[in-house]
Image (cartoon, rainbow, N blue to C red):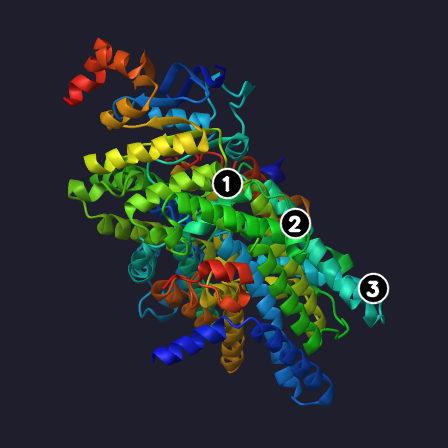
């Protein structure tokens, strides 16, 4: 029973991480109906930026400052990629943008790989401690991951449903053609979406790097793409779907590793994705796009 | 006169929106039937139901006595219902000839192995398909444009090509969705004659959605008026012209 | 100027140039292989080029002609490579004569799985189909890693070197011939019609489900054959050889040469192979430069060098006649 509870805590913390990465995919998809295949690699870069900051900063940066810096840097990079590579293709066939995103992702991951061919250890950002809650071991880091993720998600939800920006964002997602007629700059909304979406991905990269203190250039493909699966399982384009998908994937992974050889983990998660997409082609909470004839 | 198409109490709902409600229509073979009604009355939805793009929420559609509701669109097309689209849907990057050939292909009978090895029925069928498709383009005055991409054709030529493509299916029922959209009075008059010619030459029953009253009144044998997804009137052009409900719902508003 | 143009058109429409090129190419390959005309490095590179032509033309069937976006081609390669390598190393070793059946078996295994994948995902298209092919690729890779019988993560070593230059050349020519014959038939036209407008294609009686399944099966068949050829060229395979990077390489070739064009596929594969060999000394930076080329390509020439145009050499005679513009 204690073992089960322990695994449940691990599953929740992993699920939150997947959800945090998945949110970036989902936000961009919701607004542009485009899969940002580079998102996973920006997530990976989040961990590396944190490593760089900790290593080269003359003063020891406290955790909140570090987190904000990483989010701003990665978010800015996301905006830059959108500006340079995706925006010129907005009128082009959809496939062109997807290929471009895939290409951008590979450029990022392979540049990182070329500069840092081996995995690196993530330094400790703060003093991590384990404490015992009803016989279950919970680390400060896990609490922090859950707390930060929860705060970011609640903030995002409020932003989308309560603020003017959120209203504009939902309007662009609904009908990007009409929105400029209302005096709203679509480009600005899309830039902000990338800033927030990839910023969350960067934060997730940092938290992931801290909890599995080894980071590598292949993290984007190995972890980022799985978070993407989570978003798709939940129904891509749907923010609650990303969170739901993250938890499903986190749970499946933790318990498959607990019961089967760990090499089966990817096999199981990708098979789960395939099965869900075959039976629910648009995810659990997603809806089929309207076709106009 | 036997009924070619029967729409039996068909209802179509999209979520809470009821696009078509308890629609009934009987189209006898050989006639030209007009569907008119204000924008958003459900006319195109009705076409999409007949051609299988949507499955009716309630009711049934019979074609030549067989129930076709819920069948795949390709099966319905092969069964003998050809159509055009309100916003022209040609295969833009293919030549005019290829556009027609794709529809004509459905009548060719050869297997994948035959075309892989270029033997048997493949050669004969392909030659025949080109000759027949060219003849069809000729009839539509498009033979000289056969090797142009569909996107390179003028608007009028694209409209004609779309009708030619639908006729390459050898349909017994042809659905035309606003064939005169974007045309002026003179062009519409030419189109009317053109459709008259198609009707006699290809012996095809036609249903057309149209806003140009002149064309509808001139060409159609019977007319159905839709408003908010309901059939509000049905009859000959003379009857429709005199129907107060129609004038109220449609003609009165558009002040034609 | 006008004369040069007319000369080019005449050469392009000449019916016997392609067969002549084939005969000359085959003769060259046989002499190079047996007579030691080229050093082994050049022979190896040319063989890679031929295999790449197969990969590019077969992926073009799905990504170019059908207009979907598959990132799973490396998965089909893996299936073909493993199936054929199991046959030549375990089932009938030391029997080079059975290489052709082994190649076909590799292709058939891949085609079978491709058929199944298309059958299961017929409802899905666009981005979601891309995700399905991605999941498929990951599943194949991690499944192979978990099957000890095929070597697990270490893969299969000691595969006999059976992919010689003439074999690869003939296989590439056969692939092009088959795909060309398929494209210029009612089956190919149905596939292209789906790319242009699926709803209109349906309304014109095109059986879209069957056409998609056909395109996927044929594409994965040749993906499998190419994988089998690769396995017997490099003599050592492991699941890592067939990852997303491999898929991306094929995507670069397809979009470089031109979607929906066989001439483009040949061009794309040739240019890519030369480029890739030239960049070899850059190590992992090679995989930074290649995706960068892909991105720039998408930004400035999204339909590749040939676009949707086809070189008249690849057109059947009767198609050529219909395409000649009246002057």
Residue A48 visible, this angle: yes
* Nearer to me, B66 or C198: B66
Residue C127 visible, this angle: no
Callout 2 crowding tier (Cα within 10 Å): few <14, some 14–19, many ≥20: some
Residue found 63% across the figure and 43% down from its top: B109
Contact (Cβ within 8 Å) of mark 1 with mark 3: no
Do circles 2 and 1 both sit on a common chain? no
Against C254, residue B190 (above or below) is above
Residue linked to disc 3: C90
Against B236, residue B97 (above or below) is below
Q: Which mark is residue C175?
A: none
Chain letter of disc 3? C
Against C17, residue C151 (above or below) is above
Report x, y in % for residue B172.
48, 29
Q: Quadrant of the N terminus of chain A?
A: top right
Residue linked to disc 2: B121
Chain letter of disc 2? B
- In this picture, residue C152 sits left or right of residue A79: right
Residue linked to disc 1: A233
Q: Quadrant of residue C266?
A: bottom right
Residue furthest top as drawn: B244
Q: Which type of secondary structure does the marked residue at label 3 adopt?
A: helix
Chain letter of disc 1? A
Residue found 52% across the figure and 25% down from its top: B70
Contact (Cβ within 8 Å) of mark 2 with mark 3: no
Against B71, residue C247 (above or below) is below
Q: Which type of secondary structure does the marked residue at label 2 adopt?
A: helix
């Amino acid at each position: 029973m204690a073992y089960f509870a322990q695994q449940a805590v691990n599953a929740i913390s992993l699920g939150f991480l997947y959800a945090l990465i998945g949110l970036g995919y989902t936000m961009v998809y919701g607004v542009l109906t485009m899969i940002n295949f580079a998102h996973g690699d920006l997530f990976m870069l989040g961990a590396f930026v944190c490593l760089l900051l900790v290593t080269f900063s003359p003063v020891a940066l406290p955790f909140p400052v570090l987190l904000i810096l990483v989010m701003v840097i990665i978010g800015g990079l996301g905006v830059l990629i959108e500006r340079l590579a995706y925006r010129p293709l907005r009128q082009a066939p959809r496939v062109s943008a997807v290929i471009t995103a895939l290409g951008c992702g590979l450029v990022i991951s392979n540049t990182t790989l070329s500069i840092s061919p081996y995995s690196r250890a993530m330094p400790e950002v703060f003093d991590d401690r384990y404490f015992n809650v009803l016989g279950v071991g919970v680390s400060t880091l896990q609490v922090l991951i859950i707390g930060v993720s929860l705060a970011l998600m609640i903030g995002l939800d409020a932003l989308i449903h309560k603020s003017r920006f959120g209203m504009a964002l939902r309007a662009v997602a609904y009908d990007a053609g009409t929105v400029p007629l209302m005096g709203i700059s679509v480009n600005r909304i899309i830039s902000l979406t990338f800033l927030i979406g990839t910023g969350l991905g960067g934060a997730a990269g940092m938290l992931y790097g801290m909890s599995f203190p080894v980071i590598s250039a292949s993290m984007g493909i190995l972890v980022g793409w799985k978070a993407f699966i989570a978003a798709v399982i939940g129904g891509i384009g749907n923010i609650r779907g990303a969170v739901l998908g993250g938890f499903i994937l986190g749970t499946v992974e933790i318990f498959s590793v607990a019961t089967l050889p760990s090499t089966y983990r990817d096999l199981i998660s990708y098979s789960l994705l395939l099965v869900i997409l075959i039976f629910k082609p648009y995810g659990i909470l997603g809806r089929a796009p309207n076709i106009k004839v | 006169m036997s009924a070619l198409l029967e729409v039996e109490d068909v209802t179509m709902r999209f979520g809470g929106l009821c696009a078509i409600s308890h629609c009934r229509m009987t189209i006898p073979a050989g006639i030209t039937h007009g569907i008119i009604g204000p924008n958003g009355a459900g006319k195109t939805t009705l076409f999409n139901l007949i051609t299988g793009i949507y499955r009716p929420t309630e009711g049934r559609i019979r074609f030549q006595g067989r129930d076709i509701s819920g069948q795949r669109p390709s099966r319905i097309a092969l069964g003998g219902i050809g159509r055009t689209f309100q916003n022209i849907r040609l295969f833009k990057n293919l030549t005019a000839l290829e556009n027609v050939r794709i529809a004509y292909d459905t009548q060719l009978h050869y297997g994948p192995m035959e075309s892989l090895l270029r033997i048997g029925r493949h050669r004969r069928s392909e030659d025949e398909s080109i000759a027949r498709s060219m003849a069809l383009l000729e009839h539509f005055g498009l033979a000289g444009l056969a090797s142009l991409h569909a996107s390179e054709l003028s608007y009028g030529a694209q409209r004609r090509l779309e009708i030619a493509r639908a006729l390459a299916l050898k349909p017994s029922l042809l659905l035309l969705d606003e064939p005169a959209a974007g045309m002026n009075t003179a062009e519409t008059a030419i189109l009317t004659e053109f459709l008259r010619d198609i009707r006699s030459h290809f012996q095809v029953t036609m249903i057309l959605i149209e806003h140009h009253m002149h064309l509808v009144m001139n060409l159609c044998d019977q007319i159905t008026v839709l408003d908010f997804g309901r059939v509000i009137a049905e009859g000959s052009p003379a009857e429709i012209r005199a129907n107060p409900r129609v004038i109220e719902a449609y003609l009165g508003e558009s002040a034609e | 100027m006008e004369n040069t143009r007319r000369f080019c058109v005449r050469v392009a429409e000449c019916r016997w140039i392609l067969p002549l090129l084939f005969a000359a190419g085959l003769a060259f390959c046989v002499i190079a292989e047996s007579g030691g005309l080229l050093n082994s490095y050049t022979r190896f590179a040319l063989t890679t080029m031929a295999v790449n032509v197969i990969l590019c033309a077969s992926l073009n069937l799905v990504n170019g002609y059908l207009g979907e976006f598959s990132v799973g081609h490396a998965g089909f390669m893996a299936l073909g490579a493993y199936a054929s390598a199991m046959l030549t190393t375990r089932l009938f070793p030391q029997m080079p004569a059975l290489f052709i059946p082994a190649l076909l078996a590799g292709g058939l295994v891949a085609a079978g799985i491709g058929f199944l994948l298309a059958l299961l995902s017929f409802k899905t298209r666009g981005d979601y189909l891309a995700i399905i092919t991605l999941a498929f690729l990951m599943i194949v890779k991690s499944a192979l890693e978990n099957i000890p019988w095929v070597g697990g993560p270490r893969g299969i070593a000691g595969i006999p070197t059976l992919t010689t230059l003439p074999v690869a050349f003939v296989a590439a020519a056969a692939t092009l011939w088959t795909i060309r014959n398929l494209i210029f038939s009612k089956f190919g036209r149905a596939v292209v019609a789906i790319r242009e407008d699926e709803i209109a294609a349906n309304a014109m009686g095109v059986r879209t489900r069957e056409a998609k399944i056909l395109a996927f099966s044929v594409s994965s068949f040749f993906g499998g054959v190419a994988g089998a050829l690769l396995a017997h060229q490099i003599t050592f395979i492991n699941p890592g050889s067939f990852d997303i990077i491999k898929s991306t390489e094929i995507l670069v070739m397809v979009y470089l040469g031109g979607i929906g064009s066989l001439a483009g596929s040949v061009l794309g594969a040739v240019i890519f192979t030369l480029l890739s060999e030239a960049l070899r000394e850059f190590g992992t930076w090679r995989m930074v430069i290649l995706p960068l080329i892909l991105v720039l390509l998408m930004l400035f020439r999204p339909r590749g060098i040939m676009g949707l145009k086809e070189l008249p050499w690849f057109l059947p005679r009767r198609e050529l006649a219909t395409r000649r513009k009246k002057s």
